[in-house]
Amino acid sequence: MRKTKSASDRPATRPGTLEKPTSLRDLADYLCLSRSTVSLVLNDSPVAKGLRPETRERVLKAAAELGYKANYFARMLNNKRSQLIGILSPDLGEGYNASILTAIERLLIDHNYLYFVSSHHWDSALIRQRLQVFAERGAEGLILINTPTETAPMLPMVSIGSVEGEYPLTRVALDNAHGIRLAIEHLYALGHRKIAFLKGHTHSSDTQLRWAACVESARQLGLLINKEHVVQLERIDDGLNPIREGYVAAERLLKAKRAFTALLAFNDLSAIGAMNAFRDAGKQVPEEISVVGFDDISAATLVRPSLTTVRQPLTQMGAMAATELLAKIEDPTSKPRRISVKPKLIIRQSSAVCARG
């Protein structure tokens, strides 16, 4: 005769009914464990191997008994891997992110991984919430694009960009100072001494680094930076209209009492917007104002005149980050490291010899 469990052998409250299936939160509360811990075990993440064996056994047993996502759970038991990567970025509306994401996608496809992407618009609460959701949805690792990492789930992570944080993770970062120095020295060599600047957004991780490099490069060359010739970009349409941001910023520059002969923009899209504003104001590029951007997105070669810019190897950085993450997933004991990438100056038609004395 089959033995029936006594009341003392069963939990006081068992989550999950036909009307309301067991959620990850229910399962975590039932086991008195964090949702991240439960998710790591259910997705057989390599990180879960660091947990106590009895903890992993408890989670798997409870998930099976309570019918937690039965179909996915069965598939996970067969495959032993979720093959999912979470990617978090400030926004998805401009060329920088698109180039990086394309490179990440290509490499992950080659390794039979899928990915899901979300944005946070510099909201710290949203960053924490998105990272938690990635863990709950079974991500084996995370790639953070220009995203702060004050707190994070117990998952392998790699960041792209200049954001620093206390959380230990591998960082793929551009040498911003080198890129800015190349741009300013290029304009100086062309005879420009009155250079205007489009400064990056307040929340951007690269803004302060690039601006500090502008100030230092100008000091070394003996250039004076006029405060009227510095305008900070402001987000329009929640950051989804960067060309318009450059246009509006350039309009402000044109109202300055003192003329300028060159512009160094924070990124290519704002540089393109600035060139549109100059043209609408009757100013010729590069005959009257030379323009230099930063990034070298594909649109830089399509505008007229084509844009002189500092090239970030965006596809290389995306592929490098994905490669580092997959290696970290396979070997969770590997140490975090910082990878510095050198930019290069790409000279096109938007910069020319200064025509003014």
Image (cartoon, rainbow, N blue to C red):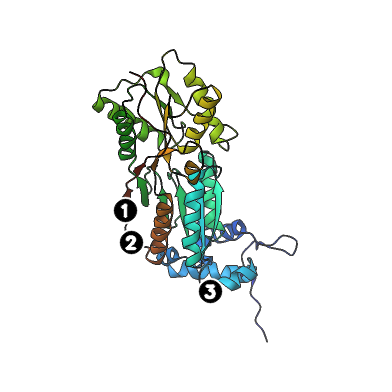
Q: Earlier in the sequence, mark 3 or mark 1?
A: 3
Across and down, in percent, residue 17 comes to 72, 63
Q: Please tell me which residue is depicted at 34% across the width and 63% down the height of the picture.
A: 333
Residue at the disc numbered 1: 337
Circle 1 SS class: loop
**Three-letter residue code for mark 1:** Arg
Across and down, in percent, residue 254 comes to 48, 19
- Give how far apart the Cα atoms at labels 3 and 1 are: 30 Å
Query: In this rendering, would 1 be left or right of 52?
Result: right
Q: Which quadrant would the C terminus be assigned to in this image?
A: top left
- Give how far apart the Cα atoms at labels 2 and 1 are: 9 Å
Give me the disc on residue 140.
none
Query: In this rendering, would 177 be left or right of 41?
Result: left
Across and down, in percent, residue 199 comes to 43, 29
Give me the disc on residue 79.
3
Circle 2 SS class: loop
Q: Residue furthest right?
A: 19
Give me the disc on residue 334.
2
- Give how far apart the Cα atoms at labels 2 and 3 are: 24 Å
